[in-house]
Image (cartoon, rainbow, N blue to C red):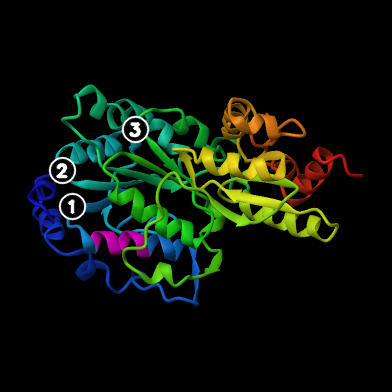
Amino acid sequence: MSAALKSLFKTPAAARLASRSPRALFGSIRYNTTVAGEQITVREALNAAIDEEMERDEKVWLLGEEVAQYNGAYKVTALFDTPITEMGFAGIAVGAAFHGTKPICEFMTFNFAMQAIDQVVNSGAKTYYMSGGSTSCPIVFRGPNGAAAGVGAQHSQDYASWYGQIPGLKVVSPYDAEDAKGLMKAAIRDPNPVIVLENELMYGTSFPATAEMASKDFVIPLGKAKTMREGTDLTIVTYSRPVAFAMEAAELLAKEGINVEVLNLRSIRPLDLDAIIKSVKKTNHLMTVEQGFPQFGVGSEVSAQIMESEAFDYLDAPVCRVTGADVPMPYAQNLESLALPDTEVIYKQVKRVLNIE
């Protein structure tokens, strides 16, 4: 570990811990290898990305609640435990980034990060600009975001549009294991503050590892969307867990001769507007899908930018936004399911936009 990082820790035990390599500390519990063709969960992909970057760069370290003894609330990470004070440890992480280290600041959920939003936005995102470029903040804020299951109104919010509005921040939201590993590694290597919005319900989902993922230099460029499915009739733009619903709906629609293109944004800010425009020019219809609230959401921004671009002249119908309900998340399971878009909702809305009975 670097001298700057060691200086953060005052107790002899912490100093001894900081002096040992991540591999020596965590070799028995971390997922260090990605093998092409094997199944890998999103959790394992995130873990491998962080492990590889800590081994690659001694300035990279991680802190958060329960990340050491308990390996993190969702078993993704392990390093320095913090008190239950998001503003406090987010401030420590930002200050450490100012001093040349590369912290990964884990929030148990981004709902709790509301306690630390001043540190993220006013300190992390703005200092490089306010210092005239003299003080950078290479930091990653990561954790679960959006709706989970049965956790109520205060633990179910999608913060993509919140952080996506802020100059100085980069915001990504992975869907599968490939996204998780490539975007996390890119976020850690980026010299700017990056928000990584994961989804709790995706952590245990397995995906086949690609040959590219096996490389320790596998990085997905920030600001680049991925076409998950080619189509000619309508474009669905989405991110995170709803990618799965969009893909399922597209398969159902294909059986009826409707060919839907699915675009996984991956990156919220910067937004890959070129990819969206290119797809809309081909399909002439656009739908956005997200689990966040309808007003001032990611879909609203995509819609506005398409309306202001050359793609507007290619639209054969108004842009359709599919979102979560405009209510605090209900706790009751039957109401919760009605508050979130799923495969059936997307399927019906595609047919409505295309004016197909």
Residue at x 24%, y 29% (from the top left corner): 128
Locate residue 7, reporting x and y percent.
Answer: 9, 46
Q: Where's the C terminus, which quadrant?
A: top right
- Residue stretch in magenta: 48-54
Identify residue type, mark 2.
Gly
Is the stretch drawn in magenta largely helix, strand or loop? Answer: helix
Secondary structure of residue under mark 1: loop
Q: Earlier in the sequence, mark 3 or mark 1?
A: 1
Which quadrant would residue 294 be assigned to in this image?
Answer: top right
Residue at x 78%, y 44% (from the top left corner): 350
Q: Compared to 338, does 119 lie above or below?
A: above
Residue 353 shows in the view: yes
- Distance from the alpha carbon under mark 3 to that under mark 2: 17 Å
Residue 108 shows in the view: no
Q: Name the residue under label 3.
A: 120
Locate residue 264, reporting x and y percent.
Answer: 57, 50
Q: Mark 2 points at which residue?
A: 100
Locate residue 353, reporting x and y percent.
Answer: 80, 38
Badge 1 local density, few (<14 within 10 Å), some, or many (20+)? Answer: some
Question: In the current view of this chain or complex, which residue is farthest to the top?
Answer: 130
Q: Mark 1 points at which residue?
A: 59
Identify residue type, mark 1.
Lys
Q: Magenta span has 50?
A: yes
Q: Which of marks 3 and 2 is nearer the N terminus?
A: 2
Identify residue type, mark 3.
Val
Q: Magenta span has 146?
A: no
Mark in front: 3 vs 2:
2
Camera-side residue: 178 or 340? 178
Residue at x 73%, y 55% (from the top left corner): 250
Q: Compared to 150, does 88 lie above or below?
A: above
Give the left or right position of residue 121, taking residue 202 as reference. Answer: left
Which quadrant would residue 354 be assigned to in this image?
Answer: top right
